[in-house]
Every structure is written in structure tokens, then in C-alpha cells.
Image: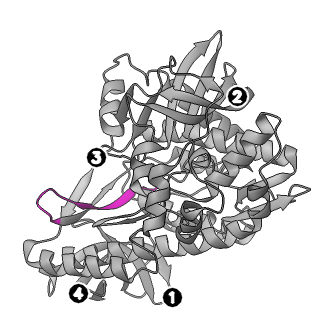
Amino acid sequence: MPQRRSHVAPSAAQTELASALAALRESVDAPIEFPADVLAEAAAADPTDPELDLREVPFVTLDPAGSRDLDQAFHLERDGAGYTVRYAIADVPGFVTPRGAVDVEARRRGQTLYAADGRIPLHPPVLSEDRASLLADVDRPALVWTFSLDSDGAVTTFRLERALIRSRAQLDYVTTQASLDRGEEGPATLLPEIGALRIEQERVRGGASLNLPDEEVVRAADGTYGIERASPLPVEEWNAQLSLMTGMAAASLMIDAGVGILRTMPRPDDDAFETFRHQTEALGRPWTTGDYGEYLRALDRTDPLTLPVLQAAASLFRGAGYVTFDGAAPKDAIQAAIAAPYAHATAPLRRLVDRWVLAICLAVSTGQEIPSWARESLDDLPGLMQESGRRASQLNAATINNVEAALLTPLVGTEIDATVIELRGERASIQIAEPAVTASAPVPAGAQPGDVVRLRVVRVDIPRGEIEFAI
């Protein structure tokens, strides 16, 4: 199991850090509190009645421990030589009145933002953490995808229906991974098997998963802040394959119907591939055979040089955006990392665009008219999502910068070793091992990616999130 490493800022810096994080959250161009009319409408929302009753199906959720905004639940079973996968998604379209107060506010927010000292949710908590969330041991309306898979894990048929479900348990990644490692039977027993088959399907398609280590600012019970880093657990990757499968199914439904919104990303051009190839050679882990997806999958996650390689590979995963269409599918419909058309369809509690995708897909799957509100407002979504993505990136990057500056406060005036990840003119992106900090720094002439260089920590500024190094 990948080891999780936590680094906590020293107590002397915690007060200054807490103030900086609070100021950052206030400075983000995003509403924090919900207007009274939005809260009232959310509390009184009358969800659409489901056509089916699937409460006898023992669904479970799988999320980080302590989550309350549960978008997805699954049920896995064998079906002859293949499998049946049921994937239930929170029925947010059934709770939100088009052009109502909740809808207007959600369009203003775009997505849930995650700060070190709290979240800025897309929907009022009465919906996102209660009435629409797929919490355990309560009846919930859901949009249920049912997939038939063959013995190789390929999808043979699928459908989407509105149903009433009842989740039996709220699983978390760490506990579930430990249970699977011990060989215990449970609701996730088939997840490694199905997940591995779907990863192989990804390989056959020519897709690639980057799976960079998670970098998360955490707040301990005593109120102190730190950074936790860990590679994704296998169970997280297997679970992600269910979401990817659903997103591809949603894209195919909308393409067949000639209306919808896709998440696209262009294939890297030859220059990008050549640059990445040179970077792998400089790091001593040359990419010489196979496509880039196979190369990335074969990397040893225990190798200290794998992180710089993955950081360099991130340059291949750029240009993602949203493309709308009504009448004919776009020519460039592929999400290159997935190597298939793809749509965001599994996180409607936390991401605005998923509500449109689900509403369109439900209508297409059940032979109904596509809702006029969804069709008429499609072209607004790329801009709304781009703006909310900008806010999310700004908040995440600034939060990490604040905490990393606090982590290095006691090292001001001392020398440290750092690994060069990527050259950027006369500076470089560097990785410090202890404490785990990624930053920009000047490096000696001739330094190459993978080299270990000696730097002195000159100055830190916690409120600004700045760290100054010298060679």
C-alpha cells in the first residue's frame, strides 16, 4: 500500500498560516454564504419521483473517509462469464428547478471549491450533504447506469434510469484497500477484478492515466495545518475506472443524439512528445518503446525518479476543455488521455456541468424529449466551467504555497538538497524530500532534470506564499 507522508508546519508558524489561509479564502472571487432564497428553495425542493424501485440492490459508496457529499454508489456482480455493474449517481437534476434560485446560484459558483479551512460548496449543504447525497441507510432518488460487461471488461450494453435506491454502507479508500489486501469478502470484492479489466481496456484504446501523487493540505484535530502526499491507492484507481466508463457511455449517448457537451483534450503534438522523450532521457528513465501510455503504466512507483518523470508527463495532458454541440457531433470529440469521447457525468453535487449531461442522457436513454432548459443553456457552460476552474486552481495553488512557506520557516538560513524536476530557463522546478515541498529555484549552470542540487533557504513569506532560494 502506498505510504502516506504528512508534514506539519511548526507551531511558531501556525498562527500566521491560519490567518493567511483565512484571508485567502475571503479573497477568492467566489461567494461563500448562500442567499436566503437559495437556502429556502433547497430545503423545500421536491425531487422528481423515480420510475423504478431498486432499494433491494445493495449499493455502497466509496469515498475519502468522512465525506458527506456522496455523488456515486455502485453494485457489482458476476453475470455468466461477464459482469453487471450498477452505478448510481445523485439525482441533482431531480432536485434543482431550472432557472430557480438554486440553479442561478449554482451557475454562479460552477463547482465546489476546496480550501484548507473549509469548502465553498456548489449547492447548499441541505442538498449536497443531506437530501441529495447518497448517504447510507436512507432512501435516495438516483440516476442509475446499468452496464453489462463481457469477460474482458468491455461494455456490451448499458442504460440509464431514474430509480429509488438505498446504500448499505459508506466505505472509505484506506479501510477498503486494507480489507481487499487481506482477501476479505465484501461489496468491493469484484472491484479489483473489474478495475484491472477496465485498465486493460484503457491500454488497448491507447489511453494513459497519469496518477500523480495526491498533494493535499490537511487540518489536524488540534487545528494545525500540514501537507499530506501519497500515490493513489489501487482501490482509488479501480474506482476511477467505473467513473471513466460512465463518462464514456454518457458521451456516446449524446453523440448519437446529436446534442450535448463533451470534455475534450487534444492529442499531444510531435514536438510535445519529443520534448518529453528528451526529458525522460535526461532523468535516466528513457522512453524508448511502446506508446506513452504503456511507458507511464510501466514506471516503478517506488523509484524516486518516477515523480520527476510524471511531472514532466503532465505537459502532455494539457488543453482540456468543454465542447458543446446541437445538430452534429464535433469533429474533435476525443479526450486524448482517455482515448475516447468522454463527458463529465458522475459528480453533479460538486460540478455544474454534470447536471446538464445527466439530464440529456436520461432523456436519450428513456426515449424522452431533451429538456429545453438544458438545450437552450448548453453554450453557457464552457465559460462557466472555465471561470470556476480558474478559481479552483488559484485557490489550490495559493493554499499549497502558503503551507509550503510555513513548512520551510525553520529552515531559513540553512542548506537543503533538492531534486531538479523541470528546467525553466535559468530556474527550475525542484522537489525537496523533507519536508516535501515543490518550488521554483535557481539552479547551478549545467544542472539537468534528476540532478540533486544544494540550495540555501534565504527567505519565506507565509502570507504571500513565497520561498526564496540561493545556489
Cα separation, mark 3 vs mark 2, equals 32 Å
Instruction: Mark 4 or mark 2: name the one nearer the start of the chain.
Output: 2
Q: Earlier in the sequence, mark 4 or mark 3?
A: 3
Query: Which label was assigned to residue 154?
Result: 2
The label shown at residue 386 is none
- Looking at the picture, which amino acid does disc 4 mark? Val
Query: Pointer 1: what residue?
Result: 425
Residue at x-position 73% and y-position 56%: 262
Q: Position of residue 466 (x, y in %)?
A: 30, 86
Count of number-bearing discs: 4
Q: Earlier in the sequence, mark 1 or mark 2?
A: 2
- Residue located beneath label 3 in the image: 3
Q: How is the image coloured?
A: one colour
373 or 305, nearer to the observer: 373
Across and down, in percent, residue 287 comes to 59, 56
Range of magenta residues: 212-224
